[in-house]
Image (spheres, coloured by chain):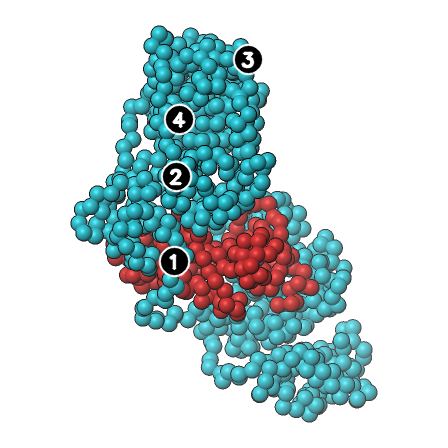
Chain colours: A cyan, B red
Amino acid sequence: MNFSYNWLQSFFKKKLPKPEKLAELLTMHSFEVAEVKKFNRDWILDIDILPNRGPDSFSCLGIAREISTLAGFKYIADKYELKEDKGIKARDFINVEVRDKTACSRYTARVITEVKVGFSPKWMRERLEACGLKPINNIVDVANYVMLETGQPLHAFDGEKLQDRKIIVRFAKEGEKIITLDEERYRLEKEMLVITDAKKPVAIAGIKGGKPPEIDLKTKIVVLESANFNPRVIRRASKRIDLKTDASWRFEHGIDPNLTEFAINRATLLIQEIAGGRIAQGLIDFYPGKVFPKRVKLDLDYVTSLLGIKISHQEIIAILKSLGFKIKHLKSKIIEVEVPTFRLDVSIPEDLIEEIGRIHGYQEIPAQFPVAALIPPKRNLDIFWENLSGGILKEAGFTEAYNYSFISEKDREIFRYSKRELMEVENPTSLDFQYLRPSLIPNLLKNIEKNFRDFAEIKIFELGKIFHHPKTEKKVLSGVMSGEVFYETKGTIDLLLNKLGVSNIWFDEYRPKPGENKLSIWQPKKCAEIKINHEKIGFLGEISPKILDSLKVAIKVSAFDIDFEKLSKLTSEEHEYRPISRFPSAVRDIAILVPREVKVAQVLNKIYDTGKKLVRDVDLFDIYEGGELPAGKKNLAFHIIYQAEDRTMTSEEIDGLQKKIISALEKNRTWQVRQ
Amino acid sequence: MEKNNPPLRIIVPGRVFRREATDASHEINFYHLEGLMIDKDISAANFKAIIQDFYREFFGKPLKIRFIPSFFPFVEPGFQVDISCLNCQGRGCSACQQSGWLEMMGAGMVHPNVLKNSGLNPKFWQGFAFGMGIERLVMMKYKINDIRLFYGGDLRFLKQF
Ligand SMILES: [Zn+2]
């Protein structure tokens, strides 16, 4: 919110600190000042008033009160004595009737007759403009000016245009209509509060004035309104008609009902000063439940204990007094604090401690470690298994991705999810985020689409939550690999599960149950269920060309999809202790085409001989003969596990060694390593 | 908090969602880390020491910390925690809008109503709570200028970590 430095200065006899300095004071003790900028011969401070401080600080007066405490200057608080004209009575011009005192806890009105509508003086126009408001005429400008000054929204009606001299505050009738000052039409609903005359709505209460009783150049009788409306009522209506105004914004945050009188007197006096006229006798005031100051007990030891800094009792009391609180001493260390009614945010001791802490200065709080017994946390097995699995996949050349938790309507159609199985987002940011993801695979395939033109080989995994209707969520581990890599995918899962300490792994041909639609994603015959001890934990296979086509992925892709909750449960049960090496191992795969009569051991020996101590282990994970292979040949696939005893091997080092092994294998002319 | 008795020291990371327009510093899903410490005599000074230590450790360099007044419904008093700008060491630069400070997170002393709602008597227990965005922390550490990169699935980005 923008504040004029010159306007703030007008509350003080003493010279204020320079704008930058003032901004720093406010930032450290009250509200962050986002910006200080020059505006003609003035400075504008853009102050981020905290939402709970709206009631007392959405006004120059509120900020002046803060400055007064921070700078130690007294601010000028006028009482505004009016000279009422005893010859005319306000009640002869206007009759106010409030029909709902919960929605409108106070309604004050004053009447000024024989005004002369025109331009307002330059100083007022300048201040309004500095705060971002457009000057209109001297009456409307005074209402706006006093709102900026005091925080109390005011409204001015042309008294002669109010039917039967009536003002009624009531809820609207369903379908009632109003044209506002800016010529917009609104259809009102029955939970919206309106101000009406004897016949029709003349304002949407607390939000916007209506066109009919508008102040114009011929206006002679001004009826000023200064009221207090229920924040919830105003917020609801403002949201419903999608109209936010300077007034509605203030009412939404709540305002002290005791402010209406002060503000209306100030405005009345200003109107008379600027537009002339006579002030009719009497303040019309509907105020059935007067609000009195709250009292809060404060234990001074608690101040020290909560903030962690010792502030003297004298200083605590001085701070509270300077903010307008009144103090009564009960016991030596307990005081009773009377809270001014404009501080709607203060009602418990902690609120007072905040006041003391921020004015004394949070920067004074020392950094002091707590003294307490250290209790080591219980081991979080979920995190343990997640980190371990992720680490294994990364060593196998995978990159971890974090995708959005959503899929689009288009994705739903491509993957043929039925709407019934998905959790739909009620109010999505965009069509891309219409459903919570029921699987990690769709977004992983999009990762492939995004990258396959730039990378020859892609291996990506994600560990994340998936969601199904009705309200179920599950953690899964899924991965995608580019290319003709069905067997490698199998090998990867083998490796992962082995390293997690699971031994009894099966890949079972998938036989769909009636009604299952898995085959819309997977390529038939090139997919399998992953089982541990005959319990199904996931699925792997090639992605069907149809899906890849729809996603514009022009290469083959294999994928795996594992129920991570099931997996970590099974692994926790199975996991046995194995000595843990100090340095990480890394895995590379190799596939080799050899004559059918070559023994696996021959190949293994060659690998061990070449790699020596740096090859810790070699696992055969696939043997394949026949099909599209040349006659008399078979294909062997191995995981080679590299690990040094004395250091972490770099990937360059591993790649170099892998190359050395490949060329050693290919020395035998009939052996062919497949890339 | 409802299931355990104090003293409590909790951190909870998790994916959170926000409905807003995305740009270089706003995302619809991101990670948040919330923390809480409750005991008989936990103060704002304790929080200052712990969080300062955390940031020094995380960024691997000496830095200063400041609290400025803020408001969150679950705490009272509430603080915004700033650290001295990592880029200019507090002298002021474009990264910190010349202020010398970077806003890091919201925090405060747990509101007595929150304690009450968890079945704890605020007469006996007190403590601090905080919440910070993890992407923001990572962006500062690695000088990443667009939060959307985290969820973009671009291997040129992902392979760097
Ligand atoms: Zn900087």
Q: CA distance from mark 2 to mark 3?
A: 37 Å
Closer to the N terminus: mark 4 or mark 2? Answer: 2
The secondary element bearing badge 3 is classed as loop
Label 2, on which residue? A65
Q: Residues within 10 Å of mark 4 (few under 14, many from 20)?
A: many
Residue nearest the viewer, comparing A142 with B58: A142
**Residue at the image point whose x is 49% and y is 31% from the top:** A246
Residue type indicated by callout 2? Arg
The answer to whether the residue labelled 4 contacts the one labelled 2, judged by CB atoms less than 8 Å apart, is no
Q: Image height check: is A101 above or below A392?
A: above
Residue type indicated by callout 1? Glu
Q: Quadrant of residue A328?
A: top left
Closer to the N terminus: mark 4 or mark 3? Answer: 3
Residue nearest the viewer, comparing B138 with A595: B138
Closer to the N terminus: mark 2 or mark 3? Answer: 2
Q: Is residue A51 left or right of residue B20?
A: left
Tell me whether marks 4 and 3 sit on the same chain.
yes
